[in-house]
Amino acid sequence: MQQQSVTDVDVVVIGGGQAGLAAGYYLRRAGLRFVILDDQPAPGGAWPHTWPSLRLFSPAEFAALPGWPMPPWPDGFPPASHVISYLTAYEDRYDLPIERPVRVTGVHRDGQHLAVTANQRTWRARRVISATGTWQHPFWPIYPGAREFTGRQLHTVDYRRASDFTGTRVVIVGGGNSAAQLVAEISTEAATTWVTTRPPRFLPDDVDGRVLFRVASERAAAVAAGKPDPGGPASLGDIVMVPEVRDARERGVLRPLPMFDRLTREGVAWGDTVRHADAIVWATGFRPALTHLRPLRLREHDGTIAVTGTCAVKEPRLHLLGYGDWTGPGSATLLGVGRTAKAAVAQLALSD
């Protein structure tokens, strides 16, 4: 039987995407012994797995991790490839101690420490920062007839290019940014039908990620000061009008239908009305990837973990970073995660 290897550190960061790198930056500045465990074979977190044409919602200067601006992109909003190059260079610039590929299988209580396990290895730490994001946990809603449909079904995580659907009929499900961008792109190659559970809310043309981050920051400051909640970015709308989406609007393809009742063998149906489809793309979002925390038994009914700031209420040695606004305003964005990471590292350093 192979002997278990045990490594002692101050902090283990689980996840080497943008949230893990931001945490690493501040852990380095705090002088703590830490390691970042990443289950991917190369840098970039989820970005290498997105479709190549995906773009940020903000110019490069408003999409930076702490300490080092993202290099400018000359043509509007940067594509995924530019983000991957930036994250790769960021790791090298700050000499972050990343081990990959390492898939964490569990986090366990071990006396005064938390034990992070992966195959035959264990890291024992006083604090753990979970920064695994959501990309590995796509959400597929359940609708009647899903198994009867004979066409292709795929989630956002599986989409790559519009040319895969040339000359076909495609139904795109979802009311957020990803759905709108996919409608815009796929409609250049295929006949598209867009369906949403509620009418999509389009942001004004001049609102992008910069404005959304400012609004999120103002909301966080107001709530922290005990003032009335002014409403966050969701109060403005859901869909950023990037150039491709504006073009789709001008072409008249951004005309969503209500959510269908069921799937049939040949398409989707509303009552007796059937629309034929060769493929259905589910742009229905993601859930937090928290399977590795299951041994700690911290999940609430909504699938999240109760936190104060980023600190888990039921396990104060654990911090959660980058999963969405419940782990800090804007913490799932490149620009927003830095502020939350700084607060998390300050909190865990003070508690030691």
Image: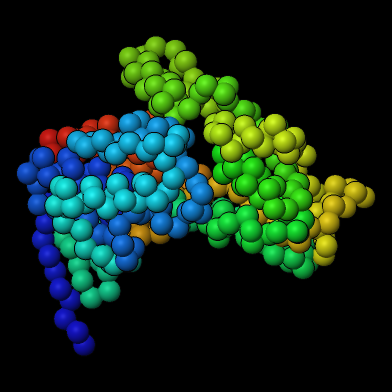
Residue 48 visible here = yes
Height in image: 68 above or below 280?
Answer: above
Image location of residue 36, percent across then percent down: 22, 56
Count of number-bearing discs: 0
Height in image: 168 above or below 349?
Answer: below
Within the image, what quadrant is residue 248 found in? top right
| Left or right of residue 126, residue 329 in this image | right
Residue at the extreme right: 272
Q: Nearer the viewer, residue 121 or 109?
A: 121
- Please tell me which residue is depicted at 73% across the width and 53% down the height of the picture: 190
Residue at the extreme bottom: 1
Residue at the extreme top: 227
- Please tell me which residue is depicted at 16% across the width and 60% down the height of the picture: 124
Q: Nearer the viewer, residue 155 or 142?
A: 155
Image location of residue 42, percent across then percent down: 31, 62
Q: Nearer the viewer, residue 53 or 213?
A: 53
- Please tell me which residue is depicted at 45% across the width and 58% down the height of the picture: 49
